Image (tube, rainbow, N blue to C red):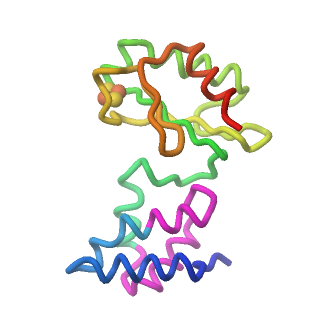
Amino acid sequence: MFELSSESVEEVKKQMARFETIESAIIPSLYAVQKQNQGWINDEAIEALSKVMQIPSSRINEVFKFYTMFNQKKVGKYHVQLCGTLSCHINGAPDISDFLCQNLDIGLDEVTADGKFSISRVECLGSCGTGPMMQVNETYYESLTPELALSILKGLP
Ligand code: FES
């Protein structure tokens, strides 16, 4: 059974105190839960958050399931989000996606056997002029080629 850590509870309460409505604190609270749970959120975590925030889990789920920055499945230590929207797509994002999946021996939304990497295709990440691009955890990498993207991942500790 998932329980929010004391650090997560403290963060959620801090966020709830910041806003006029409790619902406004859902996004930063989901970040706290995701951080505690190794990068993803499941139903048990939503229920635990619902109890702390004292709002229905359905309200939290509406937000959770809308935004791609919240992961609904287990992710790797390094979660690679490849932009697949128009500007990145026409500049080679599909080739990067295929190349990384082939070299890491996983499909999209899967985790490598060692738990180090996962890859997802996401919508525009706001770096359209320097696509194709990917986000790895909190870091953006731009103007990618398949080889450059792979070498970046291989260089991560
Ligand atoms: S289209 Fe890829 S960042 Fe906008």
Residue occupying the point 47% across, 36% down? 135
Give the answer, above or below, for where 100 lies relative to 22. above
Give the answer, above or below, for where 128 lies relative to 20. above
Based on the picture, tell me whether residue 36 belongs to the magenta stretch: yes
Residue occupying the point 46% across, 54% down? 70
Residue closest to the far left: 20
Indicate the position of residue 78 as horizontal and vertical percent values. Answer: 62, 42
Residue occupying the point 41% across, 66% down? 61
Residue occupying the point 35% across, 62% down? 63
Q: State left or right for residue 10 relative to residue 124.
A: right
Q: State left or right for residue 50 relative to residue 154.
A: left
Choose top left, top right, bottom left or bottom right for residue 126. top left
Give the answer, above or below, for where 95 lies relative to 15. above
Residue closest to the far right: 114
Q: Where are the magenta residues, as a range? A: 30-57
The number of callouts visible is: 0
Comparing 149 with 155, the one in front is 155
Position of the N terminus by quadrant: bottom right
Dominant secondary structure of the residues highlighted in magenta in the image: helix
Give the answer, above or below, for where 149 lies relative to 48. above
Position of the C terminus by quadrant: top right
Indicate the position of residue 66 as horizontal and vertical percent values. Answer: 36, 54
Based on the picture, tell me whether residue 41 belongs to the magenta stretch: yes
Indicate the position of residue 19 as horizontal and vertical percent values. Answer: 24, 77
Indicate the position of residue 57 as horizontal and vertical percent values. Answer: 42, 75
Choose top left, top right, bottom left or bottom right for residue 18. bottom left
Q: Quadrant of ligand 1?
A: top left
